[in-house]
Image (cartoon, rainbow, N blue to C red):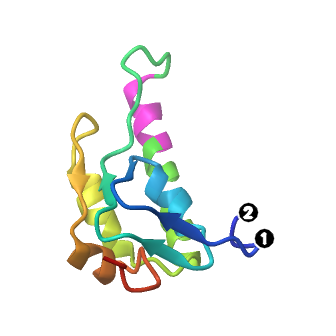
């Protein structure tokens, strides 16, 4: 939606963008983050009281991950971003370094200071 509308995304200084927020940020035509802005990723969270059985939940998570990967590829984000995302438990946050932001192409412009 953001990309189709030609909208750019920006993470200002001292702002945080955790969990699903980096996916929304990736939708921007131009993606700029201040050097003091913080991005964090983690695994998808399934509520412990979910009525689904574990096999169904596993299938749902895999399908959801595939959708996210297709979307990120469409947005020009390197799928390497999924490694720290999938390796980080849902109750923790992996903070992306400036090097990771550049490597995964989450930002499209150099980070202003």
- Residue 38 appears at what percent x and percent y? 31, 58
- Residue 1, labelled with which disc? 2
Q: What distance separates the C-alpha of mark 2 from that of mark 1?
A: 6 Å
Could you say where residue 95 lies in the image, as x and y percent from the top left? Answer: 23, 56
Q: How many marks?
A: 2
Query: Which quadrant would the C terminus be assigned to in this image?
Result: bottom left
Q: Main secondary structure of the magenta part?
A: helix
**Secondary structure of the residue carrying numbered label 1:** loop
> Residue 46: percent from the left, percent from the top?
40, 30
Q: Please tell me which residue is depicted at 40% across the width and 39% down the height of the picture.
A: 58
Asked if marks 2 and 1 touch (Cβ < 8 Å), the reply is yes
Numbered mark located on residue 5 in the image:
1
How would you rate the neighbour count of disc 1 (Cα within 10 Å): few for under 14, some for 14-19, many for 20 or more? Answer: few
Q: Which residues are magenta?
A: 53-60
Q: Residue at x 32, y 46 (%)?
A: 43
Q: Quadrant of residue 9?
A: bottom right
């Amino acid at each position: 939606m953001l990309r189709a509308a030609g909208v750019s995304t920006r993470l200002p200084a001292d702002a945080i963008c955790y969990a699903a927020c980096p996916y929304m940020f990736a939708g921007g035509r131009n993606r700029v983050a201040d050097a003091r802005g913080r991005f964090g990723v983690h695994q998808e969270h399934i509520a412990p009281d979910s009525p689904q059985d574990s096999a169904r939940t596993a299938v749902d998570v895999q399908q959801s991950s595939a959708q996210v990967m297709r979307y990120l590829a469409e947005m020009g984000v390197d799928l390497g971003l999924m490694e720290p995302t999938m390796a980080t438990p849902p109750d923790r946050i992996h903070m992306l370094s400036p090097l990771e932001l550049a490597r995964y192409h989450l930002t499209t412009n150099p980070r202003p200071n």
